[in-house]
Amino acid sequence: MVESNLKVIIYENYGIELVDINILSGGWMNKKFICRDLANTKYVIKIFSSRKVSKMSNNEFSTDYLDNQLLNNLRIENVMYCNNLNCEYIEPDKKNRILLPYGNDRLALIGFLSGHHVLRESINDVQLYYLGRECAKMHYLFRNVDKTPYKGEYLKIPTIDKLFERYEAKVNKKNQNTPKLYYELLIKHQKILTLLSEINIIDEIPISMTHGDFAADNILFEKDMPKILDFELVRFNSPLLDIGRIIMSYCYNNDILNYNRIKSFMSGYNCIIEIKDKDVFLSFITV
């Protein structure tokens, strides 16, 4: 039933006759389908859940977010694509829309990107070099993005006061069934926040537009070349958030940081934007 419904929607709005639709795994609350048309061209249909937005933002945003900020994020992704970033392209419909209503949710038709996910254990230094270069290219292009639409608290890097508020909320939720390990982690959490407050290091974190979900599950590789997926959570935060998530995805395993891998990523990034060891340290705070 869903498959037939999507075929009708795509044909009526895009003029594309689909012959095959299959569910794609992955993602949280959103739904994805891989499909192909009569010419064997592949697409991805993505349905963005309004419930996901509400849950992630603690009810700060609802469907209005899908119509405004998410739409803006998808437009940014297309600008990135047109400026030679290896990323997805959101197909416009007959009315030049890139986001369509789908009940309370929203629907986008995305050009299919070939490639595969690379596991932490399998990634090589050449792939990390090119990933660093592509990440820096993305951050360079983000410099021209209008920041004014990005007003939500959950989209921004928290202040030290906000971090203490979140810590207190966790403390207040503990009870007699709370595991001992959780108590121990809360104590460490408090010590880290106190240290961050004393050295005032959060003020040194650069703030600008960022991908917001730049991790292994949103990156494909075709041989050594990376391709970036899913600009859904673009936010006004810190570019170091993207860098920190990549390091945690590919350069950290069993409580050990692989500095050689980090250097490979940094070498690629430095081709476009300068990055220093201090930036890598600061990136861990943003993750």
Image (cartoon, rainbow, N blue to C red):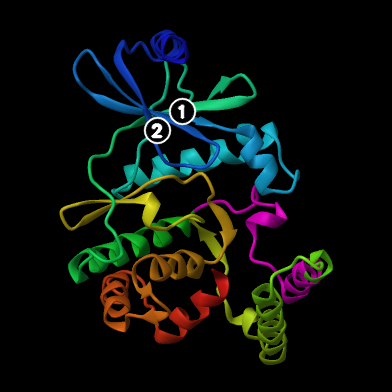
Neighbourhood count class around disc 2 (C-alpha, 10 Å): few under 14, some 14–19, many 20 upward: many
Q: Report the residue at 55% width, 35% height from top.
A: 71
Q: Is residue 3 above or below residue 171?
A: above
| Sooner in the amino-acid sequence: mark 2 or mark 1 | 2
Quickly name the residue at label 2: 90
Q: Secondary structure at mark 2?
A: loop
**Residue 213 falls left or right of residue 79:** right
Q: Is residue 68 visible?
A: no
- Tell me which amino acid carries mark 2: Ile
Residue with the most extreme right position:
172
Q: Position of residue 192 (x, y in %)?
A: 66, 84
**Residue at 43 percent of width and 57 percent of height:** 214
Task: Based on the picture, tell me whether residue 149 belongs to the magenta stretch.
Answer: yes
Q: Are marks 2 and 1 in contact (CB under 8 Å)?
A: yes
Of the numbered discs in the image, which one, if any, rests on residue 108? Answer: 1
State the extent of the magenta-drawn residues as a range: 145-170
Q: Nearer the viewer, residue 176 or 11?
A: 176
Name the residue furthest left. 223
Nearer the observer: mark 2 or 1; the answer is 1
Q: Is residue 33 something one can see in this rendering?
A: yes
Task: Name the secondary structure under disc 1.
Answer: strand
Mark 1 Cα shell of 10 Å, populated few (<14), some (14-19), many (≥20): many
Depth check: give the residue in front, 209 or 116: 116
Q: In the depicted view, which residue is nearer to us: 226 or 185?
A: 185
Q: Foreground: 161 or 217?
A: 217
The percent position of residue 220, horizontal first and vertical second, equals 29, 50
Q: Residue at x 56, y 27 (%)?
A: 106
Residue 151 colored in magenta in the image:
yes
> Residue 183's image quarter?
bottom right
